[in-house]
């Protein structure tokens, strides 16, 4: 059954969307919402985890970005998302900036060095086209400090501001009613680390939760989306990103050791709009569209 709900997600690289929001995306697609994904770069500087594909790396043939386009398409097919775009395509491509403090940061064509208002103006056009009631992106540090994640946050928030200004858009405007940032609560990571230690493994190369910059206090969580019914779709989408997500790495180890439900729960902080029922037993929203009336 088709609904009038429209969700926009703004991410930095292919695979970010599935890790952070795969279950959420699949849930809302299944409910008939229009889900739009905007990816800001093709992830050209990513580390290639599959040895037989290592020649795609930026240090070799520099074809990883093209390959990750196909991975993203496969992941979106698994989730049922048909509207996915690269920011600026086909006219302009912003390149992956690499990790903070690395040489790629200095290239003129990387997303980190994009003019904020120029990039935001491209996203404004998409906002005015699809008119989303809800937008999801990163917090001010991009979750963990990657330049492209930080820039995606800046561009998304600036575009939402400009889209709402009819003076900026020749009389047209659209106000996104609710904006959420992705969040990873401390309690979830603590549970994961404890279980991984029981199986003799560390968690993303560390056994100290304070070494993980993306971990946030639980009290910052204002919404929990239960996409457990769609966990198989999220797992399939994660497998569609083999250059970035190792099948024997911590993501799938967590699924095996904690049960797949760990990837079915996705957490958010509401930064614009009103928190509305329905709430769970901890007072968190259970629907990103709560309080939004369908026309």
Image (spheres, rainbow, N blue to C red):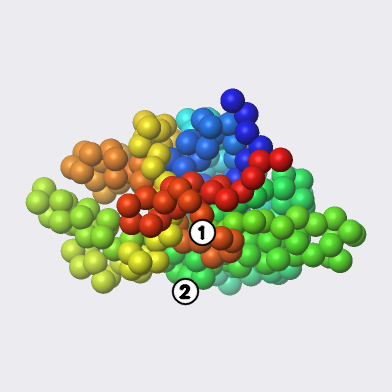
Q: Is residue 1 above or below residue 256?
A: above
Question: 102 and 31: which one is in front?
Answer: 31
Q: Residue furthest top?
A: 1
Residue 161 picture location, percent across and down: 70, 66
The residue under the point 59% across, 36% down is 33
The answer to whether residue 84 of the structure is visible from this angle is no
Q: Is residue 53 above or below residue 292?
A: above
Disc 1 + disc 2, Cβ < 8 Å: no
Q: Residue farthest to the right?
A: 170
Q: Is residue 69 visible?
A: yes
Q: Residue at x 50, y 40 (%)?
A: 25
Q: Give the structural element (helix, strand or loop) at label 1.
A: loop
| Dot 2 crowding, Cα within 10 Å, few <14, some 14–19, many 20+ | few
On the image, the x and y values in percent for residue 86 come to 64, 47
Q: Quadrant of the C terminus?
A: top right
Disc 2 element: loop
Instruction: Indicate the quadrant where residue 53 lies.
Output: top left
39 to 237, vertically: above or below: below
Residue 27 vs residue 229: left or right?
A: right
x, y percent for residue 222? 43, 60
On the picture, is 126 further left or further right than 222? right
Give the distance between the C-alpha atoms of the residues marked 1 and 2, in whole angstroms.
38 Å
Q: Where residue 112 sits: x, y (%)?
A: 59, 67
77 lies above or below 170: above
**Quadrant of the image occupied by residue 229:** top left
From the image, state whether disc 1 or disc 2 is nearer to you: 1
Q: Mark 1, residues whose alpha carbon is within 10 Å: few (<14), some, or many (≥20)?
A: many
Quarter of the N terminus within the rendering = top right
Q: Which residue is mark 1?
A: 275
Upstream in sequence: badge 1 or badge 2 = 2
Residue at image mark 2: 101
């Amino acid at each position: 059954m088709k609904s009038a709900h429209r969700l926009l997600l703004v991410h930095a690289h292919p695979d970010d969307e599935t890790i952070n929001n795969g279950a959420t995306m699949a849930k809302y697609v299944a409910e008939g919402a229009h889900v739009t994904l905007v990816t800001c770069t093709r992830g050209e500087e990513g580390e290639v985890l599959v040895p037989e594909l290592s020649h795609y790396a930026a240090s070799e043939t520099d074809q990883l970005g093209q390959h990750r386009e196909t991975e993203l398409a496969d992941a979106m097919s698994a989730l049922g998302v048909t509207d996915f775009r690269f920011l600026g395509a086909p006219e302009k491509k912003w390149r992956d900036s690499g990790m903070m403090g690395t040489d790629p940061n200095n290239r003129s064509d990387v997303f980190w060095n994009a003019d904020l208002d120029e990039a935001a103006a491209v996203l404004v056009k998409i906002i005015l086209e699809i008119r989303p009631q809800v937008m999801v992106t990163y917090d001010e540090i991009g979750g963990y400090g990657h330049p492209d994640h930080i820039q995606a946050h800046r561009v998304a928030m600036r575009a939402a501001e400009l889209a709402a200004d009819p003076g900026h858009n020749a009389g047209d405007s659209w106000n996104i009613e609710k904006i959420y940032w992705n969040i990873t609560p401390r309690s979830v990571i603590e549970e994961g680390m404890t279980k991984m230690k029981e199986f003799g493994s560390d968690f993303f190369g560390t056994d100290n939760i304070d070494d993980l910059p993306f971990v946030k206090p639980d009290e910052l969580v204002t919404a929990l989306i239960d996409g457990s019914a769609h966990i198989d779709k999220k797992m399939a989408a994660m497998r569609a990103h083999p250059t970035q997500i190792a099948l024997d790495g911590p993501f799938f180890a967590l699924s095996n050791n904690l049960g797949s439900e760990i990837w079915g729960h996705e957490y958010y902080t509401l930064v614009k709009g009103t928190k509305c029922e329905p709430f769970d037993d901890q007072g968190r929203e259970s629907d990103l569209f709560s309080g939004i009336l369908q026309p």
